[in-house]
Amino acid sequence: MTHAKKPNTDTHSNGSRRNFIKDGSLLIAGGTIGGGLNVGRVAHAYGSDLIKVGLIGCGGRGTGAAVQALNTSGGGVRVTALADVFANNVQTAYRSIKSEHGDKVDDKRFVGLDAYQELLATDVDLVILATPPGFRPLHFEKAVEAGKHVFMEKPVAVDAPGVRRVLAAGKLAQSKGLAVQVGLQRHHELRYQECIAKLHEGAIGDPIFARAYWNAAGVWTRPRRKEQTELEYQLTNWYYFNWLCGDHINEQHIHNIDVINWVMRGHPVEAQGQGGREVRKGSNTGQIFDHHMIEFTYDSGVKMLSQCRHIPGCWSDVAEHVHGTGGYCDVSAAKIFDRKSNLVWESEAKEVNGKGWQQEHHDLFAALRDGQLPNETEYAAVSTMTAIMGRMASYSGKVVKWDDAFNSKVSLANVDAMHSLTDIAPLLPSEKSEYEVAIPGKTKVI
């Protein structure tokens, strides 16, 4: 795809972007930031052998991923170990997996903040990482050091130091012959693959503008219990604290941001925007915003308008759109239109919501059985960093440049030092039981 010419007002240098790709890239040979996988080869192919899986993070998403791993064919799969901070999560996951797959799960359980270490010391071949994202860089690094293949949920970090740590661990995984797959499942949905291939072939000409949305009513809240420590409360309500979630622009809207990065075959070079809290009032909703509106600029000069909102009673939509010199594409619907709004192409793939969640496991286990080593670390880390840059822009009210954001030393928490629920939480409430919330124009993010 030919991009529009870069405007003279863009201060981001091509050299800077090349240095990032050179220094931080894991996929230099065999792929770019986008939909294609970097597939190496390993001497041992699992064939029809049993693949032993360990689950770290036994909430709903982790449990679902374990079931989807067991749904794969071509050989035996067994969940041999479960780990979570909370015992009740492990018990619930065990029962749920057993109800789906009978005797394909072992009752080997590890509980606590260090439970991941005990699980990694077992003989599992592959680990599913599905804890709150703030722990992802630590758990990914340790899983790779332990020699395990990894499936990890998105996003892969909540701050720039975490992103850099993930990139380093992904590079180590590549050198050790380990597969890495990330739960940005649209990359495994045929309709997305077909549609974006058409865009890369020039179906709408040069892209000039993109839009991405995740607008919905919001998510759960869990009441504080008297016996809980502050750290335990925040872990239970992880979605509402930046050191655990990174705000919903990172935890959820990353899917749509990632699609536009895939289309553009790269990341934005700057962001500016706004956001705030209209309905998230009080301590039961932590510190995250309930809406963000970000204008991202790519190095070609193309703008992407990114909107995510958690406010009931408003317009809801989860979608991605790209406008070009020769037409328009509803990427989420896999439909392409000419400049007169006539439908000129539509994918025949009729995948229902969630099929990508299953397909990504089919693809991963099939690759392992064939001796292939997909590594999705880079584009997942880059899309995570894009979402974090967007949060930086809305929290600060400033224009944020990619290089400044990516090289930021601001770390939201030292999760490596956490070993007990009695440890001091990284963020403490005020005497009024309120948490510090970003104030655009005053909050510093870099």
Image: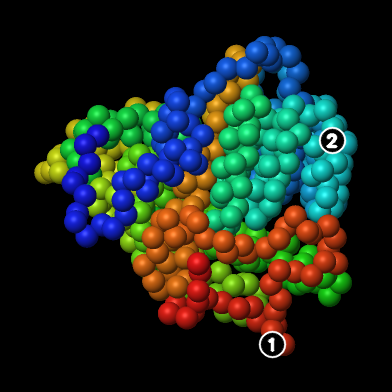
Taking depth in this image into account, of 227 and 232 the one nearest to the observer is 232
Colouring rule applied to residues: rainbow
Which residue is painted at 60% across and 52% down in the image?
162
Residue at x-position 83% and y-position 70%:
228
Task: Report helix, strand or loop for mark 2.
Answer: loop
* Residue 45 seen: yes
| Side (left or right) of 144 relative to 347 | right
Closer to the N terminus: mark 1 or mark 2? 2
Q: Is residue 329 left or right of residue 363?
A: left
Vertical order, 294 against 32 (above or below): below
Residue 432 is tagged as 1
Relative image position of residue 396 (x, y in whole percent): 45, 73
Residue sitting at x 67%, y 42%? 140
Q: In the rendered image, which residue does mark 2 sit on?
A: 121
**372 left or right of 382 in image:** right
The image quarter in which residue 195 lies: top left
Q: Nearer the viewer, residue 272 or 86?
A: 272
Q: Residue at x 36, y 52 (%)?
A: 268
The spot of residue 367 in percent (x, y) is 58, 20
Whether 152 is drawn above or below 313: the answer is: above
